[in-house]
């Protein structure tokens, strides 16, 4: 069993359920937060190996969470994948500059998302698909 913990931060319960199924099927332990404030508490509590972060969150948007993570010495090394329905062309460069590994537009293709997860965790897997590099 893969012991890697992934924190999914998204306010959409259907998306959380979908990601839970996909990630658990690939042997990841999944933790959830539905807003910016709880994402910080869950990160401190569980010290995940990876965070999948939405930008449009209540109680602190994804940029606020990302900036907080990257400015915190004990948490700044946790890789972050931004998974958002916001416009890719206006947000991709901003999230990469803020320290995210990559920006994936919703709805995400499962193979693309899993390739991004494996890449961010430094795991071997199928060849990476488009747009995972800075």
Image (cartoon, helix red, strand yellow):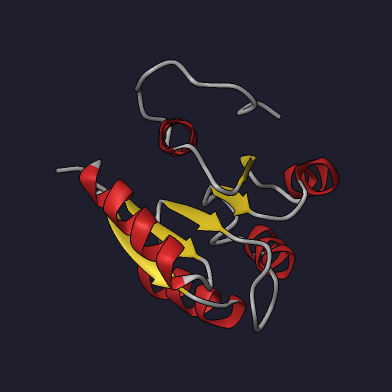
- Identity of the residue drawn at 56% across and 78% down: 35
Residue 85's x, y, as percent?
66, 55
- Identity of the residue drawn at 60% across and 76% down: 36
Residue 7's x, y, as percent?
42, 61
- Identity of the residue drawn at 40% across and 51% down: 49
In the depicted view, which residue is nearer to us: 72 or 32?
Answer: 32
In the depicted view, which residue is nearer to us: 15 or 27?
Answer: 15
- Identity of the residue drawn at 57% across and 47% down: 81
Residue 121's x, y, as percent?
42, 38
Q: Quadrant of the C terminus?
A: top right
Instruction: Pick out the residue farthest to the right.
Output: 90
5 over 38 or under it: above or below: above
Q: Is residue 4 visible?
A: no
Looking at the image, residue 122 sits to the left or right of residue 21; the answer is: right
Q: Is residue 92 visible?
A: yes
Looking at the image, how many numbered discs can be counted on the residues? 0
Instruction: Pick out the residue farthest to the left.
Output: 1
105 over 10 or under it: above or below: above
Residue 4's x, y, as percent?
30, 48
Q: Quadrant of the N terminus?
A: top left
Instruction: Pick out the residue farthest to the top.
Output: 127
Location of residue 65 (image quadrant):
bottom right
Looking at the image, residue 60 sits to the left or right of residue 123; the answer is: right
Looking at the image, residue 122 sits to the left or right of residue 56; the answer is: left
15 over 32 or under it: above or below: above
């Amino acid at each position: 069993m893969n012991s890697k913990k992934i924190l999914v931060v998204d306010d959409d319960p259907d998306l959380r359920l979908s990601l839970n199924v996909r990630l658990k099927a690939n042997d990841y332990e999944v933790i959830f937060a539905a807003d910016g404030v709880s994402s910080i508490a869950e990160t401190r509590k569980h010290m995940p190996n990876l965070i999948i972060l939405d930008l449009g969150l209540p109680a602190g948007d994804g940029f606020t969470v990302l900036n907080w993570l990257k400015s915190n010495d004990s948490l700044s090394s946790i890789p972050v994948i931004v998974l958002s329905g916001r416009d890719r062309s206006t947000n991709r460069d901003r999230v990469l500059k803020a320290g995210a590994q990559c920006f994936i537009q919703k709805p995400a293709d499962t193979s693309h998302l899993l390739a991004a997860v494996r890449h961010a965790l430094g795991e071997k897997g199928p060849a990476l698909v488009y747009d995972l590099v800075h």
